[in-house]
Image: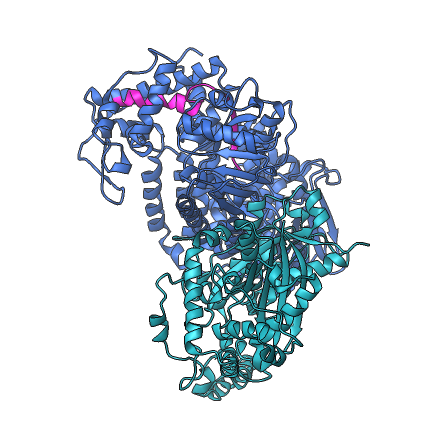
Chain colours: A blue, B cyan
Amino acid sequence: MNLKQNILIQLKAMKTLLNCPSIIHDPPHVLEDIIHGHPMPPKHFRLDVDHDGIAWITFDSPKSSANVWNEETLREFNHLLETIEHDTRVKALVLRSAKERIFIAGADIKAIRSMQHVRVNDLIWLGQAVFDRLARLRIPKVAAINGACMGGGFEVTLSCDWRIASDHESTKIGLPETQLGILPAWGGSTRLSRLVGVSKALDLITTGKLLNASAAKHSGLVSHVVAAERLDALARRLVRQKRPGLRFRFENLFSSIIGRMAKRKVLEKTRGLYPSILKAVEVVTHAVHGDIDKGLRLERNAVAELIKGRDSARLIDLFFKREEANKRPASGGTALPIHDATVIGAGVMGAGIAHILASRGIRVLMTDVTNDSLARGLERIHGLVSDATRRRLVSKVQGRDTLDRISTTHVPVPMNRHHLVIEAATESMELKKKIFADLAARVSADTILATNTSALSVSDLAKTVPHPERVIGVHFFNPVHRMPLVEIITLPETAPDVLATAVSFVQKIGKTPVVVKDSPGFLVNRILVPYLMEAVRLHESGIPLKDIDDAMLEFGMPMGPMRLLDEIGLDVAAHVAKTLAAAFPDRFPRTDALDKMVSAGHLGKKTGQGFYHYDEKGREIVPATHSDLPRHESIQTNLALLISQEAMRCLKEGIARSADDIDLAMVLGTGYPPFRGGPITFARDTGIIDY
Amino acid sequence: MKTPSLVIVAAARTPFSRAGTDLAHLDAVELGRHAVAALLTRTGIDPMLVDETILGCVGQPPEAMNIARVIALRAGLPESKPAMTVHRNCASGLEALTLAHAKMCAGQGEVFVVGGTESMSNMPFYFSRPAVEKFTALNRARDFTGRARAALHFRPADFAPVIGIKLGLTDPVSSLNMGQTAEVLSREFGITRDMQDAFAMRSHLCATQANHLLNQEIAPVLGHHVVATDNGIRADSSLEKLGKLKPLFDTVTGTVTAGNSSQITDGAVALLVATEEAAAAHNWKPLGRLVSYAATGCDPARMGLGPVRALDAALHRSGWKLDDADVFEINEAFAAQVLAVMKCLADPASARRAGLEAPLGELDPAKINACGGAIALGHPVGATGARLVQTALNQLHANDGKRAVISLCVGGGQGMAACLEAL
């Protein structure tokens, strides 16, 4: 029997069994098992049919805190659907999860990452077929969502008639696929726009954002939000009601216009560097009309194309690196829980740190030398909280609790209950030394003294206190609530428990820690400086600003180097550059352009004049220059090379613990294009440096 | 068993701000939260050590019934520790402290956060009973016609608010408002307008002079601008200015004006108190000790005389004589009322009218309210009692004094007094 005949036989068999003939034009081998397999009793699901004829399917993967879709779970689920199709007692179906914090976390990305492309395509087929089978079941279907419901986990619910969610804080709903360089291809790109309209669907899919229960209801992703314990009762009531049809979405008539606008916006933001987002826009806007099968075909084709490229693999790798950094404890020490902390300094960084700590349930004492500076800091925090409330990221009560957790003082108060002090005062060694000496005398013997310095030597600071093993650097990036990276700077004498506590603390407040050695500029700033200085040198040699910035924007940086210098402040940049130049003589591009500008009082955006001009509101006044492409490429190669070179040096010097850490730090700390994987992966992939 | 002795470990308060000014945007919960949180910050104690929170509040906001519990939770005290609100009108803030002592004696706790809170800016407006009935009917109506019919019953007068603060400051038994009871005293004890104005001016000038001392008590409220001082004090107060004010309560022949009455004010005070043993065990350095206290009753129409009997009882219990105290804090509800109290303490005939068998003696005017009183600082009714404790101890420590006596008159015809000793 040749292959062709074999496929034909399969096709026939599946047509009868799956009862959804139209999607199987081109059946992959993986579907064979759906038909021919004799499934064992399911390992990942429980099926209970109660006396009302409701089939309760409970997803509960053994020995795991998460439920994910992979070949095995999809097959088992398919078999359950088959059983239900043949069971005449069954009048309705409810899908739920037995996990405490996870409904379904989505596809098993780890498995997908190691799969060959062909097998990924097969898996897409399988998922589409199974979820479509669910959609075609003629009984009322309810998805009772409690916990994380992401990607494929949400796509399966789109095949149900009702989606109801618990109000638990772990309930997060969304389609984050584009962030991994792919797109929702198990029907999500096709079905979501029919449910909520094309613009909301595009917003969710292109940003990949996750919504909490109340926001999900607001957007129409779920119809009801109730307490977790009441989900079953609500589901029981809903299946007796008339099934809700899809509402006619007037806007969907204009999907092509909306799509074009969305595409333009994406291009503006990403310069076309993220093909998955553009593809998602295309698929969503085309799949909204016609039959579902057409949409599913578009999804399949799009994914097949996307996984051929390198981007998706890099994004998925990075995702795992980050997941690991978010969870991995520091080895060798015991982490103490931190419930109270002191933040010294109520400036931009101090207030930002106090805000993020308080929002994560830590009681914060914020100190500064005057009440006026404290008041300004509090005002800043008020602004951050009301902004988050307005955007429905936190509820009003959560926002109020955040503010309630912050207390302030400008006079010394007893601090022996605070096990962590984060100093975020002005960047002056003398001042910081004074603060540390004062602290050492006042805090209890096991208090961790952390500094948020971005450039000063942590070991010099440690010398001022009697217990240098308690000193550590905890370097947040500005703006604190948006930047996910925290560099943890260790000294040889840092106690293992102190490091372990700092790492677990940073993880607890929802940031990603990267452990680095104390060395001038630490990791991120050190790698950035040669790049920025070279950019200044290039500009000095006569290359227009816009050309340099555009070149790096096209490389994928979120901001060109000249703009970035203006944002940082030229005085700050010059200071950091000098510190580094002193530490590593003859290594960095030399230029005195910065000094000249600083002495002329041109400090960047804050003074309205840096490399660019800014109006009173801080908007850039764009100079009229045009760029020529060939030059762009040479600038790009030159500057990207410098970043990778310095990253390699840091790796060799052991500043960071691994290449992965460096890549992660650069992506999270500077916005280094994630689809390039990070400066070291980039060097390896492109061979620009002997690796 | 030895009766536990209550010591005051620490104190913190918000600035006292005239109603409708600097702190008007904060309700009684926010004010109380600020004071309690500041107390915890200043002392740095583990909140788990606090056995209970007791706060006084006269006009509890309807959205925060048992306001002490709301404040305790929001200020960071543990969920497992209870909280209760007390009400003895103007003495509520002191009642919170004495109740803590009673609980200590009953073996119901060793460490307490006590105090009081009041936002007189946020006293609610009510609707009259008939209006409320009409609103209820409107709510009950099921359909449009029912609602329309119910709506037709309303009359313009139904929408006139009943002002909560006005009700609160009127004695329901004698149906005199507080100002009118002061007028009674002014008539009966011959307290003239000039005497009252002079006393009021003295309050402002003393408070001005003691500004530094008062500011030490305050945990500044940080908002759009920093509020770090009491704002009712008039450094430029003069007899001439006070003399220009019109009488408020008896507009024709009266003597009591806004100038010689306590101000309507927002503020909150929190004190950390503990048994002497507990304080020693935690290595806390107490500010002072509660030696004795008493609450007594009097004629509601002459509620201003409340302190007379209360002082007599509290002094009797402590075994002190009037002269033994270095500091007197007698709440200035009205200048006329404080002056009447002083007269009753000293003059035999007046003493008898106030219910004493014999006068206690002459009060040294220099010892009374040396930091000014409620006429200058204001009188957030639920909080004042606790402020008197704080201010009295503060003065003892500043001037190496030993003993202080505090007292308040209480609307409804009561008085309360306490004897404190510096430690």
Q: Answer with the quarter of the image where residue A1 lies.
A: top right
Q: Which residues are magenta?
A: A510-536
Q: Nearer the viewer, residue B45 or A493?
A: B45
Left or right relative to B32: residue A82:
right
| Residue at (29% x, 27% y) in the render | A551
Residue B300 figure quarter: bottom right
Regarding residue A2, the answer to whether it shows in the image is no
Above-or-below relation of A51 to B308: above
Q: Position of residue B156 (x, y in %)?
A: 43, 86
Q: Which image quadrant: the C terminus of chain A?
A: top left
x, y percent for residue A213: 55, 52
Taking B229 as reference, is A469 above or below it? above
Along the horizontal axis of the image, is A317 left or right of A384?
right
Q: Residue at x 51, y 47 (%)?
A: A407
Q: Position of residue B278 (x, y in %)?
A: 71, 47
With respect to residue B35, does A37 lie above or below?
above
Q: Residue, x 43% and y 45% (percent of image)? A: A374
Answer whether residue A533 is magenta in the image: yes
Q: Does the magenta portion include B283?
A: no
